[in-house]
């Protein structure tokens, strides 16, 4: 989480208008979900990766490490979609395990590949927003869309408390490591269990202190933050919308 925030602030696309980036990312995400085609998913994946790595100047190795996180969950989810449980005609079975109770058909394999491709490409669309636009800018954009105040405040507080939880956990791990708390697997397991028991208590205490500090500064249920996000120029919005429309037309003509 901290590294993603770091790459978002250091990206070459960080100063680009967040409205345009949000429109571009969400537009391609919708195209990817609606089309459900492997070629379209591959094109969107390559385009988003090129924008993040080539234009945003994010190190390729760090980007690949980030992609490995959702890749593990997608592979597990795809396997559960490809393999089915029950009895089916032998003519439809491609692979059969456990006396035919667990099987894979050509249709389930095709469905799993399409699901994996569209999901992985959708992840890159979200990564494009997360790795080129700081969360504060995205929240300001959502505020301008007149989202309910409670939603905006929860986003602010959850965003802050995630870092509070990570900082508290990191401090505990460093203190345990200085005392040889991770010298062998048995000690590591014991130290991890102790860290888990203390982490939420410490984080709750810091969160309570943070809320008390907010109240002492006049917090009345509304977080007032100075907005630094400029409204998009007309030509920027029209150009982004035009790109999305052209992509949609190309995908429709390709699939027709």
Image (tube, rainbow, N blue to C red):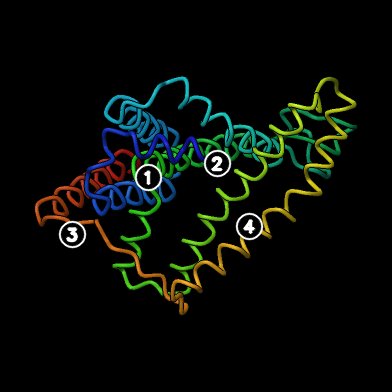
Please give the name of the residue rendered at 20% of the width and 45% of the height, measured from the top-left corner.
243
Query: Which residue is tagged 3?
Result: 231
Query: Which residue is tagged 4?
Result: 206
Query: Which residue is tagged 2?
Result: 115
Among numbered discs 4 and 1, the one appearing first in the sequence: 1
Picture coordinates of residue 53, whole percent (x, y): 35, 26
Please give the name of the residue rendered at 74% of the width and 33% of the height, measured from the top-left corner.
93
Camera-side mark, 3 or 4: 4
Among numbered discs 2 and 4, the one appearing first in the sequence: 2
Camera-side mark, 2 or 4: 4
Neighbor class of circle 4 (other Cα within 10 Å; few <14, some 14-19, many 20+) is some
Q: Quadrant of residue 176?
A: top right
SS at circle 1: helix
Among numbered discs 1 and 3, the one appearing first in the sequence: 1
Query: Which residue is tagged 1?
Result: 129
Among numbered discs 2 and 3, the one appearing first in the sequence: 2
Neighbor class of circle 1 (other Cα within 10 Å; few <14, some 14-19, many 20+) is many
- Front position in the image: 22 or 207: 207
- Front position in the image: 21 or 113: 21
What is the C-alpha distance between the residues marked 3 and 4?
36 Å
Q: Quadrant of residue 205?
A: bottom right
Is residue 143 shown left or right of residue 105?
Answer: left
């Amino acid at each position: 989480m901290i590294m993603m925030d770091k790459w978002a602030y250091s990206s070459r696309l960080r100063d680009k208008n967040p409205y345009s980036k949000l429109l571009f990312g969400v537009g391609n995400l919708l195209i990817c979900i609606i089309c459900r085609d492997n070629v379209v998913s591959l094109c969107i994946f390559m385009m988003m990766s090129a924008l993040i790595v080539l234009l945003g100047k994010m190190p390729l190795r760090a980007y690949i490490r980030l992609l490995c996180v959702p890749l593990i969950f997608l592979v597990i989810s795809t396997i559960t979609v490809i393999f089915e449980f029950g009895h089916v005609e032998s003519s439809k079975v491609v692979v059969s395990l456990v006396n035919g109770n667990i099987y894979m058909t050509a249709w389930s394999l095709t469905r799993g590949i399409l699901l994996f491709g569209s999901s992985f490409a959708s992840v890159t669309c979200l990564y494009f927003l997360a790795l080129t636009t700081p969360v504060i800018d995205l929240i300001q954009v959502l505020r301008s869309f007149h989202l309910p105040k409670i939603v905006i405040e929860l986003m602010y507080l959850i965003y802050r408390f995630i870092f509070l939880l990570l900082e508290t956990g990191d401090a505990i791990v460093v203190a345990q490591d200085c005392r040889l708390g991770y010298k062998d697997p048995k000690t590591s397991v014991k130290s991890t269990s102790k860290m888990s028991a203390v982490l939420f208590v410490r984080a709750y205490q810091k969160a309570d202190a943070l809320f008390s500090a907010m109240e002492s500064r006049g917090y009345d249920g509304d977080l007032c933050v100075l907005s630094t996000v400029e409204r998009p120029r007309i030509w920027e919005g029209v150009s982004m919308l035009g790109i999305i429309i052209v992509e949609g037309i190309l995908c429709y003509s390709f699939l027709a």
